[in-house]
């Protein structure tokens, strides 16, 4: 039993501090500005690239941590600085996850570095799954990919929506697109494709004006007769044909192009939600110590003190679920009870609740933009919606623990 520990090792502590300093010194000073402007924070991305924080080497090292925790620590610290800016920095990793989760070693080696570029030539990546009529229901995608055997090309048509970094053409932007090859097979008839930067036919549709995470670019991606070479099919055609043949014969399969990415990313999304919750908790705790009413600090009232105690307890509880899921994912432990979904569900709902309590503690000041807690509350709400709504997470967990495909 002596081997069990919840302590972070020295490398993790150093990485956590490094990213925290970047969040405190680079992200937080401009967070309100980019929230107001609703623009991609190119200067922050460039600074992150300059110091190696935004790079495929950094992400590779985070993924390589055998405990699985380093990436979660980084995600929490960046979101502590600003969730919208954090998503501008981390959105590329969604595309990377799509490549790593579905690609061959050769495809991973070719495309992952191109998702980030270099400090002198910064790139982005986007992961395009959701559609106007298929958000949580990813098994019914309408975007089609048809193979042109004569040219060894795939022709992709459709519209994606709610895509982080979607359609940006200011810098080279690698899109990973999930499309249906055989609609009759639903999720098992889907495949993931890399659409290289500058490919004709891919364009940005509507850019969404959002309630929160405003510094993160969210838009539609329109694919109009987009042609990509055959080698841009992640995993290769032989593997896809074999998988679809098994599906047509009724053989079971756990593989689904979109879900393999979500399984890996949900705990990291939960870590981002933790960063928001922690920021709001820390701010309201200091406020409660300094703010005086009726001759004493408001934290001396049980109504405030108990609220802060509950906030801290909920954040720590959610972090334990996130870290467990990250460890399980990195060490090949099967999510038999929906542990990945548990972590994202708990952290997202904790972030919404904690930021609401922070507003309540600040009273009227919590409701105005002069103080940051209203922004944190706006930012938090998306964490109960994207990467699977809270309702979908509960459905995943319920199916896992019951063994029943609950509709």
Image (cartoon, helix red, strand yellow):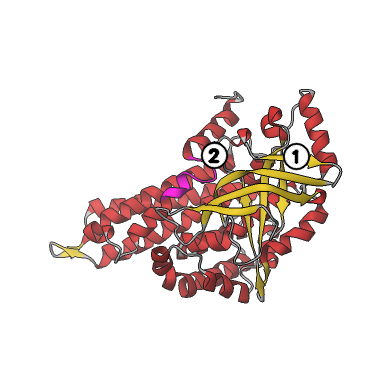
Residue 283's x, y, as percent? Answer: 35, 63
Q: Quarter of the image containing the C terminus? A: top right
Whichever of callouts 1 and 2 sits on the residue coming sooner in the sequence is 2
Task: Using residue 62 as the reference point, say whether residue 393 is left or right of it.
Answer: left
Which residue occupies 60% across, 23% down?
Answer: 404
In the rendered view, would you say 51 is above or below 11?
Answer: below
In the rendered view, would you say 230 is above or below 407?
Answer: below
Residue 321's x, y, as percent? Answer: 53, 46
Residue 91's x, y, as percent? Answer: 58, 57
The number of numbered badges drawn on the structure is 2
Name the image quarter holding residue 243.
top right
**Mark 1 Cα-neighbour bin, 10 Å: few <14, some 14–19, many ≥20:** some
Name the image quarter holding residue 361.
bottom left
Would residue 17 be visible to someone looking at this image?
no
Q: Circle 2 sits in a helix, a strand or a loop, which is it?
A: loop
Q: Which residues are magenta?
A: 381-389
Which residue occupies 47% across, 75% down?
Answer: 25
Foreground residue among 272 and 318: 272
Using the image, tell me which numbered label, if any, was put on residue 146: 1
Per the image, is 200 magenta? no
Task: Using residue 114 as the reference point, say whether residue 205 is left or right of it.
Answer: left
Q: Nearer the viewer, mark 1 or mark 2?
A: 1
Would residue 16 be visible to someone looking at this image?
yes
The residue carrying mark 2 is 135
Foreground residue among 307 and 167: 167
């Amino acid at each position: 039993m002596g081997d069990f520990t919840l302590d972070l090792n020295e490398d993790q502590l150093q990485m956590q501090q490094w990213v925290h300093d970047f969040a405190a010194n680079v992200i937080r000073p401009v967070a309100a500005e980019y929230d107001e402007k609703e623009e991609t924070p190119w200067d922050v991305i460039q600074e992150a690239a300059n110091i190696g924080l935004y790079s495929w080497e950094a992400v590779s090292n985070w993924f390589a941590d055998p405990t699985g925790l380093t990436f979660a620590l980084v995600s929490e610290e960046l979101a502590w600085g600003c969730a919208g800016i954090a998503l501008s920095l981390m959105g590329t990793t969604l595309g990377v996850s799509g490549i790593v989760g579905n690609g061959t070693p050769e495809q991973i080696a070719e495309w992952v570095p191109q998702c980030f570029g270099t400090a002198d030539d910064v790139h982005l990546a986007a992961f395009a799954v959701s559609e106007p009529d298929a958000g949580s229901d990813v098994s019914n995608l309408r975007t089609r990919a048809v193979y042109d055997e004569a040219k060894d090309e795939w022709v992709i048509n459709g519209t994606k929506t709610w895509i982080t970094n979607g359609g940006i053409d200011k810098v080279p932007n690698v899109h990973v697109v999930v499309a249906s090859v055989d609609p009759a097979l639903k999720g098992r008839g889907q495949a993931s494709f890399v659409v290289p930067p500058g490919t004709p036919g891919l364009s940005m549709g509507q850019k969404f004006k959002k309630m929160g995470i405003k510094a993160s670019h969210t838009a539609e991606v329109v694919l109009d007769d987009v042609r990509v070479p055959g080698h841009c099919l992640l995993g290769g055609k032989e593997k896809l044909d074999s998988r679809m043949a098994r599906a047509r014969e009724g053989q079971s399969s756990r593989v689904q192009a979109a879900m393999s990415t979500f399984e890996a990313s949900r705990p990291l999304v939960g870590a981002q939600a933790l960063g928001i919750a922690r920021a709001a908790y820390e701010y309201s705790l200091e406020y409660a110590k300094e703010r005086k009413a009726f001759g004493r600090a408001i934290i001396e009232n049980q109504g405030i003190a108990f609220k802060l105690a509950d906030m801290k307890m909920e954040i720590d509880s959610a972090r334990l679920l996130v870290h467990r899921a990250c460890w399980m994912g990195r060490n090949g432990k099967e999510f038999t009870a929906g542990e990945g979904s548990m972590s994202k569900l708990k952290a997202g709902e904790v972030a919404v609740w904690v930021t609401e309590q922070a507003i309540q503690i600040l009273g009227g000041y919590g409701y105005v933009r002069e103080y940051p807690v209203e922004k944190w509350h706006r930012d938090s709400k998306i964490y109960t919606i994207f990467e699977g709504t809270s309702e979908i997470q509960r459905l995943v967990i319920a199916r896992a623990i019951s063994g029943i495909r609950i509709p």
